[in-house]
Image (spheres, rainbow, N blue to C red):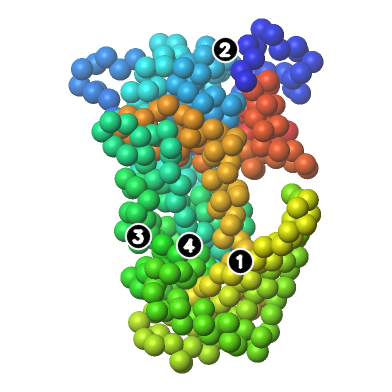
Amino acid sequence: LIIPLTLVKRSWFTKSPFQAKDGIMSDLKLLATILYRMPEPRRTSKGNIRHKLVDIIVIALCAIICRCDSFDAMEYFGHEREEYLREFLELPNGIPDADTFRRVFERLDAKELALCLNEWLGTEHQKRCTIAIDGKTIRGSENEKHKAFHVVSAFVAENQLTLGEVTVPEKTNEITAIPELLDLIDVEDGIVTLDAMGCQKKIVEKICQRKADYVIALKGNQGDFHSDVELFFSEFANKYPKHTTTEKGHGRVETREYVLCNNIEWIEKADCWKGLKGIGMVKSTIYHTKSKKETTETRYYITSLTTLTGFADTVRKHWCIENQLHWNLDVIFREDACLAKKDNSPKNLNIIRKIAMRLLNAARSGRETKKLVMLKASLNPDAMLDVLFQRKS
């Protein structure tokens, strides 16, 4: 939803436009200084570059914060906010058109864009945090030249921070992408969580080399190892302490029982799994209040942790990457519906959306949702700048 400024009542503004110009310029200077380091993807030798790269990226970020989801919408947003944008952007030849946005995002180096924007916002996090690594396919990015891009992200559960991402051609490439991603980010003293696809000896070794702990799902892809762990817990789970939690909501009551065993001497070739100190089990019993039916699911894990409460807390936090990152990209930013398919545009827009999501999270107060903050930003240019430059109103 983009509402022309001419239709916005003055009473909707919490403060007069442009009053914080000096603060805006100071904030923008830092962002511009970092973005100027990016390699220019356009032909600089021809002398036909009409729009500043910094202007294009900042307008795109502002547009996505204000609920735009296409290059055409970015152009429309720019024209509606042009008077305001000119207060802090150069715009030497006005607002770029949709084709300019498209061409630039097709050619921008996605890794460079992520590095610059993350440097601007900073990627500091507490040392002992849960870093969930998982992949998401950008459904709408497939075309005749390539399959839909699959983005493997590292997500800090405690503050909903995306540390980094690696893009691969399809989901099966996650196994090779995870070590590459671990080399790009700081996981020291953290706890890395992975689903069963990441349950590989080389990945476990890489996590340990990066001086982190791990909790990794164990499924049938590990053959006898999984069968032995399943059989062990079926026989001896009741002999170990349990940590139990109960959650109610969405028409169901879910009870989870966590069990951790640190006696792993019986596991064949346990020393092949670097840092392995325990195996865990989580039994989820779900009671559906409408149908009055009950379902049960049991999952197994390998871990370098030694405390039951630490294991239980980490397993639960892994799902933050699904609930707080992937769900938001799909539902709030409508990523899978985006029609950008060519070259680097799907990857670059994925990065911009994650940065916008982080800014929106920081801008929330009280019971505000991200959707409400986006609505406020689309109605009020000052509110948009408060989100962009992380300023409290």
In 3D space, how far apart are the residues under numbered discs 2 and 1 (Cα atoms)?
52 Å
- Mark sitting earlier along the chain (1/3): 3
Whether pointer 2 and pointer 3 mark residues with C-beta atoms closer than 8 Å, the reply is no
Q: Quadrant of the C terminus?
A: top right
Q: Which mark is residue 175?
A: 3
Q: Which mark is residue 297?
A: 1
Q: Which x, y percent locates residue 243? A: 70, 76
Q: Which x, y percent locates residue 378? A: 64, 23
Extreme residue toward the bottom, this view: 265
In 3D space, how far apart are the residues under numbered discs 1 and 3 (Cα atoms)?
25 Å
Residue at (51% x, 50% y) in the render: 162
Q: Which mark is residue 80?
A: 2
Relative height, residue 300 to residue 20 (above, below):
below
Residue at the disc numbered 4: 195
Q: Quadrant of residue 306?
A: bottom right
Toward the viewer: 350 or 47?
Answer: 350
Is 234 positioned to the left or the right of 382 in the image?
left
Whether pointer 2 and pointer 1 mark residues with C-beta atoms closer than 8 Å, the reply is no
Secondary element at tag 4 = loop
Residue type, numbered disc 3: Ile
Label 2 vs label 1, nearer the camera? 1
Residue at (45% x, 21% y) in the render: 71
Residue type, numbered disc 4: Asp
